[in-house]
Amino acid sequence: MSHIQIKAVDIYHPQKSVNNEFYFDHFKKQGKEIEHFIVDIMGRNNRYVIDHPNENSLTMAIEASKKVIKKANLQVEDIDMIIFSTQTPEYTFPSSAMLLHKELGAHNKTIAYDSNSNCAGMTVAVEQLSRYMQANPRIKYGLVVGSDHNTVHCDPNCEITYANYGDASAAVILERVEEPAGFIDARYTSETSGCRNILAPAVGTSKLFKDNLSQEDLYIKWIPFDGSVVVEPAVDDMQDLLTEHGLTLNDINAFCLSQFSIKNIEMIQQKLEVDKEKFIYVGDEFGYTGTSSPFIALYKGIESGKIKRGDHVLFWTVGTGWQIISMLFKY
């Protein structure tokens, strides 16, 4: 039986880093004190922000993809499939995957398409590609890239988005191998009762060219809600996933979770009663990067030596709506 392992992971982020003081000052002018929310709840310190007019989700993905192909000691001709995960595509057609295919110079038999599960997107794409590669022996190497240009869509009057998000891209190479390693399984939970709490663009795409639109109509519309509602189902899914595969929490070497909120990570850690050192946190450096955030955590975990070959890694993240995915890998 073939197995699908992560051969390499790499990232790209813009050069400009913005610290909390900028946002504290920005919102103080609006009469808002956001220090507790941004530091203690969200866990922010810095975030990388695009400030070049020609940089966007596509250009970041191109750079991350080139880096990961080089790191994997592959040529672009080796890539049999490309999935581009984004909720902020620079164009709706052609697809971002087709533009990436062209810029990389991939061969004309390479499967290439976009995927959007919002912030859960890259994790979903890795799970879906892993299963497809298991079913299709013609796919030896697959590329998944997650890239969101978040900050351009954030309302400067909304502290939840404007002070929280950063811009970045992550890319992984999946490889078919014969030894027992790589993708094990995943679990999903979808709860759509609050799926209109976050809308982007706020008015919907069918109204983008109507007269008398305000700037706010084009930004992300965020109706505040209790983000901790995902904690209980996250814990349940993780425990069910491990039980089904004969593993315990002690077998998990690292947790690469959504970097949206440090408080959610802490709540999950406490409910699981797992050493907090196993949880990779990068949201203090990168801000919240959306679809790529669990894989930026993976990248930093590998680079720091906290994640090694043979380790069991548990991924978890949540997409707008909400949809959560828990995914188990043997790295």
Image (cartoon, helix red, strand yellow):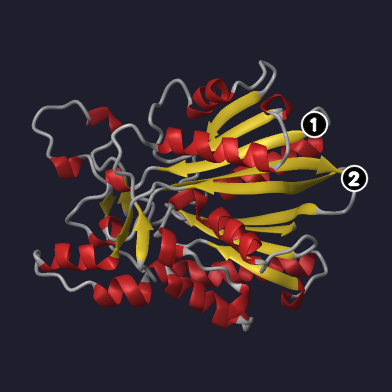
CA gap, disc 2 and disc 1: 14 Å
Task: Measuring from the top left, give residue 276's x and y in whole percent.
Answer: 58, 80
Q: Secondary structure at mark 1?
A: loop
Residue corresponding to mark 1: 136
Decide if residue 6 is on the left or right side of residue 150. right
Give the foreground label among 2 and 1.
2
Q: Nearer the viewer, residue 2 or 18?
A: 18
The answer, for residue 190, to whether it is visible in the render is no
Place residue 30 in its image quadrant: bottom left
Can you say whether 319 is above or below 203 in the image?
below
Can you say whether 223 is above or below 9 in the image?
below
Label 2: few (<14), some (14–19) or many (≥20) C-alpha neighbours in 10 Å: few
Can you say whether 99 is above or below 48 in the image?
above
Q: Residue furthest top?
A: 108
Q: Which mark is residue 112?
A: none
Task: Measuring from the top left, give residue 123's x and y in whole percent.
Answer: 59, 50
Label 1: few (<14), some (14–19) or many (≥20) C-alpha neighbours in 10 Å: few
Q: Residue at x 37, y 69 (%)?
A: 42
Number of labelled discs?
2
Q: Residue at x 14, y 70 (%)?
A: 32
Q: Secondary structure at mark 2?
A: loop
The answer, for residue 18, to whether it is visible in the render is yes
Q: Residue at x 54, y 20 (%)?
A: 102
Decide if residue 163 is on the left or right side of residue 311. left
The amino acid beneath tag 2 is Glu
Place residue 107 in its image quadrant: top right
Q: Which mark is residue 178?
A: 2
Task: Measuring from the top left, give residue 266's x and y in whole percent.
Answer: 50, 77
The amino acid beneath tag 1 is Asn
Can you say whether 244 is above or below 117 in the image?
below
